[in-house]
Image: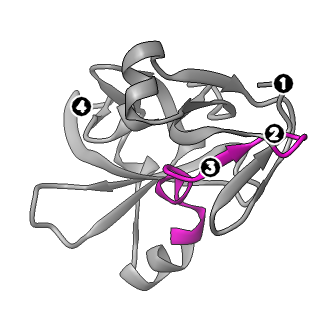
């Protein structure tokens, strides 16, 4: 999901870059991307929401949408209410398996670009371990439970 940040949102209808992705909102169960938060320019205070179901394709070059009608404005207060469902609130939390073992800290979330479904977490056991072994992908097999400090996920082993 980290790769989505700062990608341009491009309208297929007029081949124009409309906005830049600045945030990702997840569904209430956090199993799917529900929307992308976008802004135009650096200093703009206007928040634009792109429902993920309106995304036609995602690539390293940008996010393609049909036209401007796919976007809508959101007030700052509404956006703050949805902060609790932001993917940024998961990054940095410990991932714990069914046995209670800490698998590492969540560093990224992988998703299926076709439908926005969360499919795996990328975890790190620390900087030294990351340098020696790299980060691991932990597939998400079923639901997760979220707390202030961790993500308890149905995953296999360690």
Q: Which residue is mark 1?
A: 157
x%, y% of residue 114? Answer: 61, 23
Which structural element holds mark 1?
Answer: loop
Which structural element holds mark 2?
Answer: loop
Q: Nearer the viewer, mark 3 or mark 4?
A: 3
Label 2 environment density (alpha carbons within 10 Å; few <14, some 14–19, many ≥20) = some
Name the one closer to the observer, 37 or 125: 125
> Spatial distance from mark 3 to mark 2, Cα to Cα?
10 Å
Contact? badges 3 and 1 (CB < 8 Å): no
Q: What residue is rendered at 55% in x and 43% in y?
A: 105
Which structural element holds mark 4?
Answer: loop
Which structural element holds mark 3?
Answer: strand
Q: Which residue is mark 3?
A: 94
For this orientation, the residue located farthest to the top is 133
- In the displayed structure image, the side of residue 17 where residue 47 appears, left or right: right
**In the rendered structure, which segment of residues is drawn in magenta?**
83-100
Q: Magenta segment: does it hold 3?
A: no
x%, y% of residue 41? Answer: 11, 55
Q: Which residue is mark 2?
A: 97
Q: Quadrant of residue 153?
A: top right
x%, y% of residue 104? Answer: 60, 38
> Spatial distance from mark 3 to mark 4, Cα to Cα?
43 Å
**Between discs 2 and 4, the one toward the N terminus:** 4
Q: Is residue 89 above or below residue 21?
A: below
Q: Nearer the viewer, mark 2 or mark 4?
A: 2
Name the one closer to the observer, 157 or 82: 157
Q: Is residue 34 above or below residue 131?
A: below
**Between discs 3 and 4, the one toward the N terminus:** 4
Name the one closer to the observer, 77 or 56: 77
């Amino acid at each position: 999901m980290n790769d989505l940040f700062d990608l341009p949102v491009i309208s297929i209808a007029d081949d124009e870059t409309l906005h830049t992705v600045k945030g990702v909102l997840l569904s209430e169960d956090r199993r799917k991307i529900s929307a992308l938060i976008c802004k135009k320019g650096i200093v703009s205070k206007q928040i634009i929401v792109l429902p993920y179901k309106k995304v036609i394709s995602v690539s390293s070059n940008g996010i393609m949408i049909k036209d401007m009608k796919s976007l809508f404005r959101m007030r700052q207060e509404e956006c703050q209410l949805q902060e609790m469902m932001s993917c940024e609130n998961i990054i940095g939390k410990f991932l714990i398996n069914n046995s209670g073992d800490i698998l590492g800290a969540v560093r990224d979330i992988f998703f299926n670009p076709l439908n926005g479904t969360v499919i795996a977490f990328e975890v790190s056991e620390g900087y030294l371990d990351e340098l020696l072994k790299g980060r691991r992908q932990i597939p998400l097999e079923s639901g997760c439970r979220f707390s202030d400090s961790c993500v308890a996920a149905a995953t296999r082993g360690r």
